[in-house]
Image (cartoon, rainbow, N blue to C red):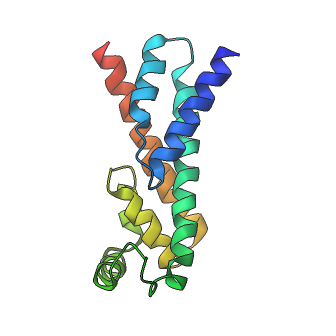
Amino acid sequence: MAELLSLLTLFAAAFGAATILPFQSEVVFAALQIAGEIDVVLLVAVASLGNVLGAVVNYVMGRWVEHFRHRRWFPVSEAQLDRAQRGFARWGVWTLLLSWAPFGDAFTVVAGLMRTRLWVFLLLVTVAKTGRYMVLAWATAAAT
């Protein structure tokens, strides 16, 4: 039961960290890995799944952002949104390989805005985010 709760906590932290919410999944991941009670492969899988699904939330938000673009309460200016679209148009879907980075959430929103094919989005984001947790697992193991 404790293992399931730990995995659910990791999933929630990873999910939240991939959205616009201020979550940190690395601390939860590293703590669980150091505790050594759950296989690191399972930790990487659960964290990656949560993080990718959080990115899908951003993607869906991006698909709908055009509907709210001209509202007074919209948190992004026209210039910022246009700049993001131009940058994505220039660098393309490959920017999604940076979705693991702290600023990467913006790329996942813009990918939805730019109507990136979902399978391309999922492939690149999964590679990036799983790679991130694999590097974190390696770094945590090396530090202990």
- Number of numbered discs present? 0
Residue located farthest toward the right when viewing the structure as drawn:
1
Residue pictured at 48% horizontal, 55% vertical: 125
Please determine whether, in this image, residue 13 is positioned above or below residue 3: below
Residue pictured at 43% horizontal, 20% vertical: 31
Q: Is residue 54 left or right of residue 86?
A: right
Q: Position of residue 23 (x, y in %)?
A: 43, 42
Residue located farthest toward the front when viewing the structure as drawn:
72
Q: Quadrant of the C terminus?
A: top left
Q: Specify the quadrant of the image occupied by residue 107.
A: bottom left
Q: Specify the quadrant of the image occupied by residue 139.
A: top left
**Residue 45 seen in the figure:** no
Depth check: 38 or 7 in front? 7
Residue pictured at 47% horizontal, 50% vertical: 18
Residue pictured at 58% horizontal, 68% vertical: 60
Q: Position of residue 58 (x, y in %)?
A: 51, 62
Please determine whether, in this image, residue 138 is positioned above or below residue 127: above
Q: Position of residue 115 (x, y in %)?
A: 53, 78
